[in-house]
Amino acid sequence: MGKFTFKLIKDIIRDIIFSRKGDSMAKILVTMPDEFLNKVDGLADNERCSRSELIREALRNYMRRVSKQQLKNASRNAEILENILG
């Protein structure tokens, strides 16, 4: 897997994670302890955003972190494969 392929994979992941154009919103039900929800609501108040906005942003940040780690792993694996294949 060459650098071009790695860049293409990186671009596709970025487009999926960060795409917001024309996204429709789905409603979900999430269960959490009351104490945790109170902390979430307190953070939302401090950030002056809704509970939903806070949770969406937290999930986006988490997905970015995971994506970056996956890209590092893919890059490392591609480098190993290139070294093996010569």
Image (cartoon, helix red, strand yellow):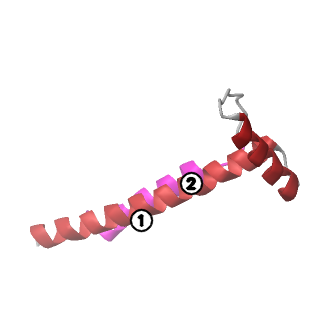
Eyeballing the image, is 82 above or below 39? below
Instruction: List x then y, in percent, for residue 48.
Output: 88, 54
Residue 79, by quadrant, is bottom left
Please, what secondary structure does the residue beneath circle 2 have? helix
* Distance Cα–Cα, label 2 vs label 1: 21 Å
Residue 15 at least partly seen? yes
- The residue labelled by disc 2 is 62
- The residue labelled by disc 1 is 7
Eyeballing the image, is 62 above or below 6? above
Residue 8 at least partly seen? no
The image quadrant where one finds the C terminus is bottom left
Q: Nearer the viewer, mark 2 or mark 1?
A: 2
The one of 85 and 55 positioned closer to us in this rendering? 55
Question: What is the three-letter code of the residue carrying label 1?
Answer: Lys
Q: Mark 2 touching mark 1, by CB under 8 A?
A: no
Please, what secondary structure does the residue beneath circle 1 have? helix
